[in-house]
Image (cartoon, rainbow, N blue to C red):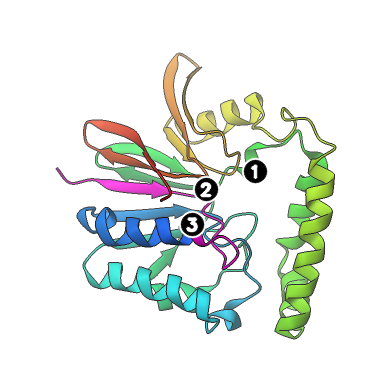
Amino acid sequence: MPHSLFISDLHLSADHPESASAFSGFLASTAPQAEALYILGDLFEYWAGDDDIHDPFNQQVIQALARLHANGVKIYLLHGNRDFLMGEALAAACGARLLPDPSLIRIHGTPTLLMHGDTLCTDDTDYMAFRAQVRTPGWQANFLAQPLAQRKAQIEQLRAQSKQAQSRKTAEIMDVNAGSVTNTLRNHGYPRLIHGHTHRPARHEHEVDQHRCERWVLPDWYDQGGYLRCDESGCEAIKIQHG
């Protein structure tokens, strides 16, 4: 049956060879059977700019995606909170198309809203302020004007600060805000919602204005992987064991 696959939060890097190996196996064995693969953010642990596409590890990921595209599978990318600097050069190298966040599309007959998910975490006001800053064209232009090595050093520093800040935040603050989810579903016509970011894989049902809406949260790939398979009959969450 024609179907599409959804993944997010792979956080691929040379420091996590198990995740990279699991992703390579997924692209070689599972993904070729699909019509489309949607990557809903944080494909990479971080992305310093498209001038980093020649890095050997990044090339492995890019070439694997390009092979999947050459086999006839459509690939779509959303920005995550770690790789929001992915640009058209990277997308072209992968054979992928960048989608805006959010994107409302019809998946095998069902209106489906695709998001990374970080914009739903509105209780985390410090992160939302940081996100607003780094998504401005001016900030990004200034950042990308710096040498690549300098950018990577800054990102590593920001990651360390973020990890420290997260240790002081409650789990509830870093999860989605119920009101934000409700408003998002209402504003987009009560679709099915698929997102990642929170690393809390689950299926939720929301009743909004007497409409029953399905929300799928995708898993991260740190300890094990997973994906969502959707066809005209619905969606199924499938785990991948690292090995």
Q: Are marks 3 and 1 in contact (CB under 8 Å)?
A: no
Q: Secondary structure at mark 3?
A: helix
Q: Is residue 74 visible?
A: yes
Q: Which residue is mark 2?
A: 102
Q: CA distance from mark 3 to mark 2?
A: 30 Å
Determine which of the numbered discs, if any, sits on residue 119 in the image: 1
Left/right of residue 16 with respect to residue 103 in the rendered view? right
In which quadrant of the rendered view does residue 86 lie? bottom right
Determine which of the numbered discs, if any, sits on residue 18 in the image: 3
Within 10 Å of disc 2 (Cα), the crowding (few <14, some 14-19, many 20+) is some
- Magenta segment: does it hold 5? yes
Left/right of residue 22 with respect to residue 34 in the rendered view? right
Q: Secondary structure at mark 2?
A: loop
For residue 47, above or below residue 165: below
Query: How far from the left and from the top, in percent, is residue 26?
Result: 33, 55
Tell me the chief SS of the magenta region: loop
Determine the residue positioned at 78% across, 73% down.
153
Tell me which label, 3 or 2, sits earlier in the chain: 3
Left/right of residue 219 with respect to residue 239 in the rendered view? right
- Magenta segment: does it hold 198? no
> Which amino acid is tagged 2?
Pro
> Which amino acid is tagged 1?
Thr
Q: Is residue 95 visible?
A: no
Query: How far from the left and from the top, in percent, is residue 207?
Result: 48, 16
Q: Which residues are magenta?
A: 1-19
For residue 238, above or below residue 127: above
